[in-house]
Amino acid sequence: MSHSQDSPRGYLTVTFAAAVTAALAAAGALALSLPVWAMFIGWIAFFTRGLTTRSTLENLGCVWLGLGIGALSALASGALVPALGVSLALPLVVFVVALVVVSLRGMPVLNNLPSYFLGLVTWFAAHLEPALESVVHLAGATTLGSIAAWVSHFIPRQVLKAARA
């Protein structure tokens, strides 16, 4: 029987490894007081582009930058709302953020638009105060998720490759 990922044994191996890794990552997030849902954002970012170690780092970098841009946009909104009102300040900030983020897709590296938006969504879904500590907290959760996704992708393949040898 073949032990490739396409074989029943390979498919089960990869599936079981991903499930175990997800459970361990969730337990790790809980132990570190990180939001489990944000850990899964990092997991999703891993699969947005190029399933390599380099792509993992680039995708995660885009998520982190998205988090930072989200925090800065929250600060900008907070500063503009008293003068302009929410109905003008929020669309203005969203326009500038969208302009910046969509422009970043042209960068030679760190050009993963979906990962930028995953970072922005993570920031706004968390409802945290715009502070460096908040960004670092969410960056830790997304990092854990990307590492877990990397492990769930590469380790089973190495095990299956070794079993074939």
Image (spheres, helix red, strand yellow):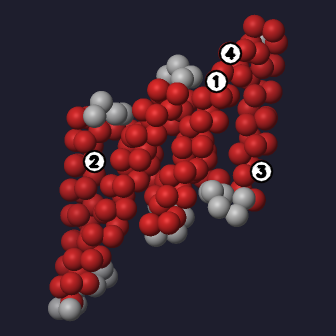
Query: As drawn, is 158 to the left or to the right of 40?
Result: left
Q: Secondary structure at mark 4?
A: helix
Tell me how far mark 3 sits from mark 2, CA to CA. Answer: 33 Å
* Residue 136, position as x, y percentages in the image: 46, 34
Q: Earlier in the sequence, mark 3 or mark 2?
A: 2
What residue is disc 3 on?
Answer: 103
Tell me if label 4 and label 1 are in contact, CB under 8 Å: yes
What residue is disc 2 on?
Answer: 25
Q: Secondary structure at mark 3?
A: helix
Query: Which amino acid type corresponds to the residue marked 4 in the rendered image?
Result: Gly
Local crowd size for mark 3, using a 10 Å CA cut-off: few (<14), some (14–19), many (≥20): few
Q: How many marks?
A: 4
What residue is disc 1 on?
Answer: 74
Query: As drawn, is 153 to the left or to the right of 54?
Result: left
Query: Which amino acid type corresponds to the residue marked 2 in the rendered image?
Result: Ala
Q: Earlier in the sequence, mark 3 or mark 4?
A: 4
Local crowd size for mark 4, using a 10 Å CA cut-off: few (<14), some (14–19), many (≥20): some
Residue 78: give its label: 4
